[in-house]
Every structure is written in structure tokens, then in C-alpha cells.
Amino acid sequence: MVNPEAVLAGIVDPELPMVTLAELGVLRGVTCSGGRVEVELAPTYLGCPAIEVMADDIRRALRAHGAGDVVVRTVMSPPWTTDDITAEGRRKLAAAGIAPPRPGGPVFVGLPAAPNVRCPRCGSAATTLMSPFSGTACRALRRCEDCREPFDHVKER
């Protein structure tokens, strides 16, 4: 069997396919015993609809590389936050036109517009919240007032 961490490092997020699960920071732990591999996976949101797809992708990839028994457990503690996204994950999100969340940012309660969300295309901080929801529950839709382009923003939590 190939190193499980190496296999897991290549699995992309089903909703943000420009980043891997490792770059997104949802992989919490991997243990191996004999032919059995156990993976701990943290959802980005309670009730995240992608968690089962992620688990299936993990099982399929590990089995394709020789793992006999694969167990994927969803863990809630510690809870996932946007601070868990790696620097490379943030870079890839921005390169794909999605504004990454600020590291160490405050937790917003309610639906206020997050301040200083920079446009991933031109870098302007003059952006406006168009909708608190976008393609997935973890993204908001914003528009740059300078280049006039809409873009997704991964919400801070």
C-alpha cells in the first residue's frame, strides 16, 4: 500500500475542486493498522452535503492504492474553521477567482458584509456583498466596484 497521507494529499474538494481536502484543512487524522486505514474528517459546516462525497472519495482512493479496510469518521472537535485552510489553499482559491477568507479573521454573527474583502482579480478592497449565499453554503457572492466583476468569497467563520 502507498503511504495513505500521499494518497489523501491528492483528493480534491467536491465543491471547490481547485483545492485538495488537505489544503482545505478538513483532514484531521490518519491511522494505519495492518491493512486498515482510519481517516478523521471534519465538515466545513454542520450538515455539509459534501461530507459523504468526501468520505466516498477517500475510501475509493485508498482502496485503489491497496488499502483493505477504510473507515472514515466524521469528527466535530475541534471544529473546522477557515483558519484551517493552508496558505497554498488560499492561493489556489484566489487564482480561481474566489476570494479566500482572511486568516485569523473575526467571527461574524448575522449577515453583515465582511470588511476588506479584496477582489481576487484586481486586488481592490472596494467590494460589495451581493448575496450572503452563492454556489455553496460556505460561499458568498460579491462584486468588485473597480473592475465590476462578480466573485465568490469563502465566508469567514
Image: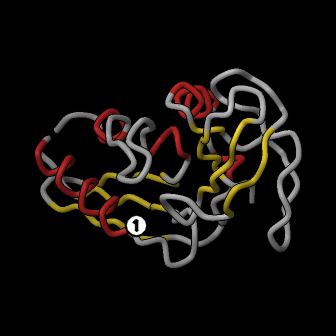
Q: Residue furthest top?
A: 122
**Image quadrant where residue 66 sits:** top left
Q: Residue at x 58, y 38 (%)?
A: 98
Q: Is residue 28 left or right of residue 130?
A: left
- Identify the image quadrant of the C terminus: bottom right
- Identify the image quadrant of the N terminus: top left
- In the image, 97 versus 18, the foreground residue is 97
Q: Position of residue 155 (x, y in %)?
A: 69, 55
Relative vertical location of residue 13 with respect to residue 123 in this rendering, above or below: below
**Image quadrant where residue 73 sits:** bottom left
Q: Residue at x 28, y 54 (%)?
A: 58
Q: Residue at x 59, y 46 (%)?
A: 152
Amino acid found under the numbered disc labelled 1:
Ile
Q: Is residue 128 left or right of residue 65?
A: right
Q: Position of residue 18 (x, y in %)?
A: 42, 35
Relative vertical location of residue 80 with respect to residue 65 in this rendering, above or below: below
- In the image, 76 versus 96, the foreground residue is 96
- In the image, 142 versus 96, the foreground residue is 142
Q: Position of residue 142 (x, y in %)?
A: 68, 48
Relative vertical location of residue 70 with respect to residue 1 in this rendering, above or below: below
